[in-house]
Structures are given as C-alpha cells and as structure tokens.
Amino acid sequence: MGRKSFRGRKGKSKGSDPRSNGKGYPETVKDNATFKAYYKNQNILPDEEFDEFYSTLQTTLPTTFRITGTRSNAIQLREVIQNVLVPSMQSIEVDGQTYQPPMSIPWYPDNLGWQVNAPRTVLRRSQEFSKFQKFIVSETEAGNISRQEAVSMVPPLLMDIKPHMWVLDMCAAPGSKTAQIIEAVHANDLLNEIPTGLVVANDADYKRSHMLVHQSKRLQSPCFMATNHFGQQIPTMHVRDENGKTVAWQFDRVLCDVPCSGDGTLRKNEMIWNDWTQGQALGLHRTQVQIFLRGAQLTKVGGRIVYSTCSFNPIENEAVVAEVLRLTNGALELKDVSHELPELKRKPGLTTWKVMNKDGEYLTSFDDIKEKRQRFRFPASAFPPENAESMHLERCLRIYPHQQNTGGFFVAVFDKVKPLTAADRVHEGNQIDAHEIQQSETKEEELVEAVGGGDDEEVTTPQAEEQTTTSLPATTITAAEETAETKMDETPGSKRPAEESNNQAKKKQKQDVPKIQEAPFQLMAPDNPDVQKLTDYFGIDPKFPRDQYILRCEESAKNRTIYYCSKSVKAVLESKDLERLHIVNTGVRLFVRQGSLEDSNEIAPFRLTADGLPLLERVLVDDRRKIAISDEEDLKTLLMKVMPIIDTFSKETQEKLKNLDVGSCIFEFDVAKAFNKPLNKSLSLSLPIWKGRSSVNVLINKHDKRSLCQRIFGVTGSDNDNTNNTKVNTNNDVDDQSKPQDQQTSASKETTTAE
C-alpha cells in the first residue's frame, strides 16, 4: 500500500531545518504520542513490557534474508555461507566494538533463513563483512537470496504445504511469501519429479502482479500462475480433476495476507511515525473481511487458510477474524499452532479491544455510538463480539519486535471443517443440479460484495442448505473506505459525505480490475512438428508429457517462444471459464526460436533458455548436447569473456566443442574445488550455451554472470560483458513482443543443479 512522501518545505535550503539530516528534508522523529497512547489503552502488552516494545520500535531493523531456489540449489548455497563465509567473520572488531557474524534464524527450518547483526556502516568498513556484503548483493541480483523481513516468513511456514497441494496467495505482491510457497511445493525436487500441485499468486495491482513474475522466475516452476484480480473478487472457475470430472476450483491451502496499515513495519518504514492514525485500520477493515471471506469460500473442506497482517491493530486483526468466524458459522476453526515453530516467540491474540473516534474517545461497542450519523463512520464488526471468549481468539499469534529483534506481525491459522459453499456440498457428496450450483455460486460472490453494506441491506448466506436469506448485523463502512492510497492522498480537510463514499465503494466493489489484454496462452498439440524436432534434437525422454507445451503469442510472433507447464496448470488452461481469469504469466520458458519462421530447414531452429535448463536436464536420456568441462580456466573464460573463440579453451574442451554441431548445448562443471574450504556437498554448475562455428556464448544474463564470478572467483566479471550486444539474442528474460514493457524486465536465472 502506498504512502505519501514527506518533502522539505518550499523555500527552505538544505539543512535549514534544525532537524535536517543534510539531505534537504527533516529527519523522522521516531515518536508518536497518539500511536503510543492508542496501543497502551488497547492493553496489547503489560505496562512494564510496553516500554521495551516501544523503544525497540525506535531502533533500526536488522537485515534478514532467505536462501531461495530449488531444494538442491538452496542447500548448496547454504554450504557456501556456513562453511566458507561465516567462519571467516568470527568476532570482527570495528572501532573497538565486536560484532558477531551472520547467524541463522533459529525458528526457520533447515538454516535457510539468516540475520545480519552488524549495521550497514560496519559492513562497508570491515574487510570480512564487506566481502560478505558483496556476496549478498550479487546473489540477490541473481535471485538466489531474497531479502525478506523475518516475521513475514512465518505465514507460509504455518500453511503446512505439500507438493500435491493447490495453493492460492490472494494478495501476493511483491512475492516473497509466494516464493516460499513455490519452494514448499517443490520440496521433493531431489526426487526428480514435477509436483502435481499448483501455486496461484494473485494481486489487484497490474504492475505489482508483474513483481510476482520477477520473484518467481528464480524458481522456474511449471506449477506457477500469476493472476490480476481484486482479492475479494477472484472468480469462480471449474476445472477437470484427475478423474476427468469437472469441479469448482478450490485450494488445499490459501494465504490471505491482506493490505493493512502496516504499523508493524515501523522499524523499516520510518514515515509511518508521521502518518499513523487510527482511521487507517477502520478504513481497511471491510476490505480485509471481504478478502478473508472470499478466501474461505475458495478453501476446500479439510483445507487450511492463513490470515495475516503486518499491523498491531486489533481492528485489522482479531476483529476481522471474529467477523469471518461469525459469517462462516462454524465452517472455519481457529487452530492452535502454539506447538509449531517452537523457537518463535509470540503472544496470544486479544479477546477485547477498543475503537477510537476522531476526538480521541474510546468506544467499547457499537452501542456506544449515540448519533445515527456517526454510526456510518464505524463498522460494527470492528468492535469485540460478545462471544469473543468462545471464538478462542487467543489462538491467534501476535509477534512483537522486542521479543526476537524483528518487525511486528499478526497471524491466524484456520482449518475448514464444514461445508460453506455449493462446491463444498458437492465435494461432500450432496446431489445438486447445475442450475442450483450456478445460483449458489452467484450468491456466494454477492455475499462477499455485501459485507458491511449497511444496516438495512439483506444478503444471502450460501452455507445454509436451504439457501435462506439472512440479514447481516450492521457492519457499515467508514468514509475512509475507498482505498488506503486514496485516503492518504486526500487534501487535508476535504471529506466526502459518508453516504457518497459508501455508494462509490459499492460501485467499485461490483467490478473487477480492468482486464489488460495479455497475449493468450495456448496449449500445443502433442504431435506439433516443433515438439518432435526438439525431442529428437536434445534427446528428451519420450515419456516426458508432450501435451503440456504451451505458446504465448500473437499471430505476428507465432511459435517464437515455447513454454512448459505442469498438469495442474494445463487443467486450468483447459477450463471452460478461462476467460474469467486474468492470467499475467504461467509456465516455464524452455525454448526460443533462433531465426525466423521461414528457416524451416535450419539444423537447430531453437535455443535452450536458462529458465528451462533445470527442467530440461531432468528428462534428457543421453549426453548428446552436453559437454563436461574440468578446467577452471575454461569456466573463467566462458564467464568473463564475451563470445570467446573456441581456440581459447583447453585442448580437451576444444576437441569436445569441435565434435558438436552448431546449436544449443549444455556445459557442466564441478565448482566445489574452486572454494578454499571443502564443502559437505558437491556443487555442480550447468550453463546453457550457444555453440557457433568458431565461438561460444553463454546464454545467461549479466546479473547471473556477475553472481557466478563473485561466488567462484571472487571478482565481479568483465565490465564489457553485455549479452545483448552479441550476434545471438541472449536476453532470455525478454518474452514475446506482445508483452508490456514492465513484464519484459524480469529476474535473472541461476542454473546450478544437483550432481
């Protein structure tokens, strides 16, 4: 969610304000009396602990990161950090102060989450820390490391994701949690299999939805799909299951990490100190309830949904949980996860809280609002329900910064234990005809729209067998409802009448995001000549499914790029409701046509992409297009020279290259010996290569080259390395020309594979 920027006053020179930091604008004063009083009155912590909580908020958040990628690659990179880098950083002293080396986050599984304890100034001034910093920068550019706030790693860990599951991330951008989900679905990659699961990452903002593509590209999952919808209006669709039966698409796991006021991020987003008001939570409450309720509808019976925010405010947290528990009428069960992630320190959820009005007065219930006009300003569901104790709201997780030197977060985990929708009842074996199902699905979508619609509005609650009409208690919206961005960009003092805001919010809610005309995805026929040509040329296993290749193109760019998708993505692409789904991207880019469509007699019409290499390597039956190189100088030449001449390689490598026809091939190299200290696991590197008549070209982008050179040789690579200037188009991150420019800028691809 966007925040307005704070600029220096007009006419003031740099440094003229006594609070100026020398950059032309005042330093942020990390103190907010209203914020402090509000949360003290909410009794979120005992008085003696609150002071520690507040003082921690005023300190800088430590840097944390997560090792990303396929299981095999993540383990290899962890080996480098643990056995090569960290041992050289013990008890580093700078200006008389000793700093500890980076440490693994104790509650994150398999030592794949890390925390850097030294501030950035120290990282630059110490030779050992500086080397580590350069390593982190290069690996982040290559997509092998994700700088992610530690507490935001928690929700995906509590989802208990398995490789066969269908998972939905409803408000996914920028995509760090989505990456965790993809990694969980691919947890069995060492078994050399494509998961049967599906990951759908959705975001309401079109440009931000392309950030999901950027984040996911490092993982190159054929099971991934990015979509662009309002979270509360993700469409109802129907797909064929493994038995060929058409069913409503529902998910085994749903992550509902909703837009929020974000005051849990105060340690890194300092402007919140200036901007914070209690009205932001009230303005977002209705939307949060809607998104969560829609997520509950899309969760299978027996499935799990996780609701989370980076806010301390109970109006965005426990109040939303309580309202959705009420609306779902026993279909959801708030789960006790106190035994999970045992080393993560957390506090229980609140069972009572207060609502503050604009005059700073606290209201404990909707009945405290005496004037009818004022009732339009507060959602009734923002107040504690009378049966809060029986809802077990204490099972929610509240993560506070002072407990483990983190940011703030709220997480609640639910199991869906009873039918809520028509799809649920069909799954339970109830006989419902197609017309009744269609009516029920429409009513389910209308229920989400009507949440908080007003005192007199009646909506249909579809979980009842007889589809009765029920009047929801008043959950009216505030004048701040529209969106967080609109709220913050309002001219001070200008307020719309509550009724007008209510009507406009309803109008917005009835339509989804404007549909961008993306180039369509089309499944290729199994007997397509290009599929056969590629199978023969690379030696692809005949058992590798041939009905999951897809194209994304307009007529002018037909057959330019070939993707590959999983069986689960194929099921979605074959849905009769596909036009309802705004797909931003899906599938793994395997091959790009080298030359024009008229070059039908070309020996090697397609080149292999770095994106598709990890997938393709699994299914090659022989080494007809592989070359094993053992000379370290050959690898250095390949990575640090632009289109090196074949004669510059070692005699052994020259011989192998000269015996290979022109076209795409794969170089394999064991780089474990390049490190000064032994690794517990072998580290192998696979690179996509275009072999020309007299030279070769490595088909990876400059970020990957820089990362590999830094990791293996301790240098950043050649400054002249620009793969876009070579004869062969090696920019593997540029998709079909029909895609928008934002989508053509993507993440880099690292191609390390397990030996």
Image (cartoon, rainbow, N blue to C red):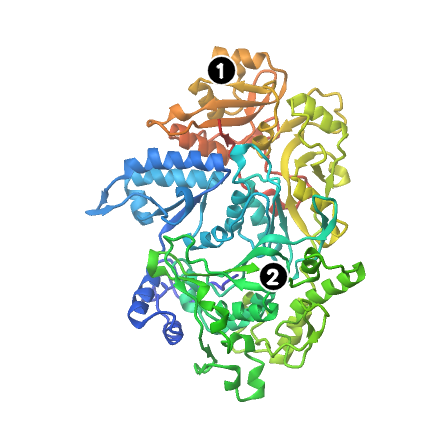
**Which secondary structure, mark 1?**
helix
Nearer to us of marks 1 and 2 is: 2
Q: Position of residue 33 (x, y in %)?
A: 36, 74
Q: Position of residue 710 (x, y in %)?
A: 41, 32
Quadrant position of residue 394: bottom left
Q: Is residue 473 above or below residue 177?
A: below
Q: Residue at x 73, y 26 (%)?
A: 532
Residue to which mark 2 is pinned: 296
How many residues crowd around disc 1 within 10 Å: few (fewer than 14), some, or many (20 or more)?
A: some
Cα–Cα span, label 1 and label 2? 61 Å
Q: Is residue 487 visible?
A: no
Please, what is the three-letter code of the amino acid marked with disc 2? Answer: Ala
Q: Secondary structure at mark 2?
A: helix
Tell whether 511 sits left or right of 133: right
Q: Which residue is mark 1?
A: 648
Point out residue 581 in the picture as x, y percentages from the top left corner.
70, 53
Indicate the amino acid at tag 1. Thr
Q: Is residue 424 left or right of residue 658?
A: right
Can residue 231 be seen in the rendering of this structure?
A: yes
Which label was assigned to residue 728?
Answer: none
- For disc 2, the neighbor class at 10 Å (few under 14, some 14 to 19, many from 20) is many
* Image height of 591 relative to 358, above or below: above
Report the residue that reaches farthest toward the left: 96
